[in-house]
Amino acid sequence: MPIRYGFRRPGDDDDFEDLDPDELLALLSDDLLEHGDLEAAMDRLVRDGFTTSDGQRVEGLAELLERARARRREIEDQVDPADELSRYRERLDEIERVEDEALDQLEAEATDSGDERRREVTEEYVRGQRLRRSLSGTSLADRVESLQSYEFTSSQARESFEALVDELRADVLNTYFEQSKQFLENPDPAALARMREMMDALSTMIEQDRRGEPLDPSFDSFMERFGEYFPGATSLEDVVRAMAERAAAAEAMFNGLSSAQQAELRGLVESMLGDMDLDLSMHRLVSNLRQATPDIDWHRTARLRGTGGSFADATTSAEQLGQLRELEEFLGRANAAEGLPEVDLESVRRNLGPDAAAHVARLQRAMRSLRDQGFVDRTRDGLSLSAKGVRQIGQHALRDLFAELRHAPVAGAHRDATIARGGDREETATAWEPGQPLNLHLSRTLRNAIARSGPGTPIRLHPEDFEVEEYEATRRSATVFAIDLSLSMAMRGNLVPAKKMVLALTQLIRTKFPRDFVAVVGFAETAQELRIEDVPALTIDYAYGTNLQHALALGRHLMRAERGERQIVVVTDGEPTAHLMDDGQPYFAWPPVRETLERTMAEVLRCTKAGIVINTFALDIERSQFPFVEQIGRVNRGRTFYTSVDELGRYVLDDFVRSRRVG
């Protein structure tokens, strides 16, 4: 009876270091940005596995599921209880053949002796022996039971039959008590009586526990008497669970046979248990085990189609198949990430090996690390990115864009320092000029005075000694990113790069220009302000229309209280095809009607009058296909960029960084 307990030292089966949560979030981000569903992205990552930045492959649940299925097929091909039934029948046939030869030999000797009386007595004896055997049933159990009361003529046949019965007894006992095989190889009457006492005591405790009564005997006293049958068990639940799983596996082994074979094997088991006076105790115990473990499937079937193997071996295979079936259910469940913590590592290790267990353990730790690091929150609505997680994805996107700039620089993308008050201090200084603020760089000024007049005190300063500190100029700016969410953006694959660009630029503004104002507007049939935290999960609304008029109006409204430079960065892949009517309802038409263009241009004029610059990034379209952009640029004096989706982030980043510098 398999009791599954053990220990593991830190590091056992841990072939991999824990995955950095930041790297894991980066692996998730592309899927999340494309489909907008964090739980689905986590499910796909857990199911498909991934390769780390250092080239290590972490197998996903889909790969482990294939391992489990392959292992199941391997076990199914190992043994076959029907084959074992045939083997026992063949052995009985051989025993009876040897017995028949002995009877024939006995008759021949009597005939050859010439003693008529001896011949008559011998013939009558032989007829009686054969009649007694012919009256037995044809089933294996009936034949064994009949031969147990039969007096063999052949000593060889008798010894072979006794060995067969001993083997059958051990096999039947090991079918239910596999872990105690060493105690049952030669079960003598004392050992069988002790086993019966154990089963009765265990049944009594289960019944008492079900009624809520104190255990008598107590579990400790039970283990003192019978602990050798249950190595490693520490509670009644441990003992019950292990025995129930073994008994259920025996049932699964029975159920995998044909009805005739099943009846034959059950009859044989009943006969052997009855022969050992264990049948009543066993029936009582199995009944109690069924009631104590309602979660176990006692009706499952193990279809074994190999060759050979004992009934105990077949039961062990059926038990492994049951464990693999449960494992397959966990590995194949739809919500892989949510079910991952429930996957039993010991079951994986036992059935698929330590390597598979190491992969599952790493996946479990990786998913847990996202919550531990605060990248993911769980609410009543499910999993979602935290604000920290959104910032981290933005940082990834920003890092990627800067890497692109380094490899494909845009002309003019360089840093200039100027002398001004109120910015970040530079590690440089320059000569002071009359009229500038006297913000002395003290060490450089004193060094100049000493170099001019020589060492000694007092140090006398002259105006030409003065050097002032350099600061990076700072100007408060306001930026609204207006992102086209029309259906064409998703169909052309433009939405994910646009989301990456927004996350990168908002992260840049928040970290490098924290005094700046930044907001995000999404527009399709209508426009709405978006929380930056919602951008990763943003999806297309599948409403027709590109309402640039509403987007510009909303952006202008959001910046109404802002001072300094203000701009709206528009990312779109088509002309305006929708506008708001006088009653506030959206109107859509394709191709765009005159009223849509006029109302959009009227909003461009309002932005221009308010001093708001409109910079438009037109994706994957030719100038001739989008003449309205040219008109926006001419009226507003903003810039227009015709770019591919692959260059969007780099162009927007470069334009933004350059516009934030003072030459």
Image (cartoon, helix red, strand yellow):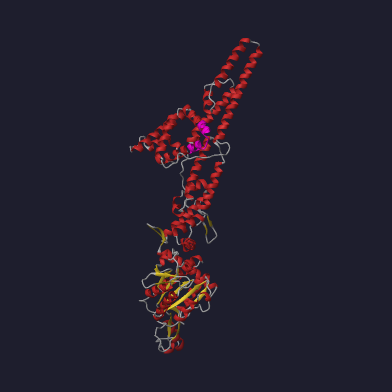
Name, please, the residue furthest toward the left. 213
- What's the magenta region? 249-265
- Percent coordinates x, y for residue 42 in the rendering: 46, 58
**Vertically, is 118 above or below 60?**
above
Identify which residue, 587 or 572, lies in the foreground: 587
Residue 185 visible? The answer is no
Residue drawn at point x = 48 percent, y = 76 percent? 629
User: In this rendering, would 623 be left or right of 207?
Assistant: right
- Percent coordinates x, y for residue 160 in the rendering: 57, 26
**Vertically, is 589 above or below 352?**
below
Report the magenta stretch's main SS: helix
Magenta region includes residue 175: no
User: How many labels, in total?
Assistant: 0
Identify which residue, 504 or 118, lies in the foreground: 504
The image quadrant of residue 235 is top left
Magenta region includes residue 264: yes
Residue 602 visible? The answer is yes
- Percent coordinates x, y for residue 551 in the rendering: 41, 72
**Vertically, is 275 above or below 306?**
above
Residue drawn at point x = 42 percent, y = 68 percent? 525
- Percent coordinates x, y for residue 337 in the rendering: 45, 55
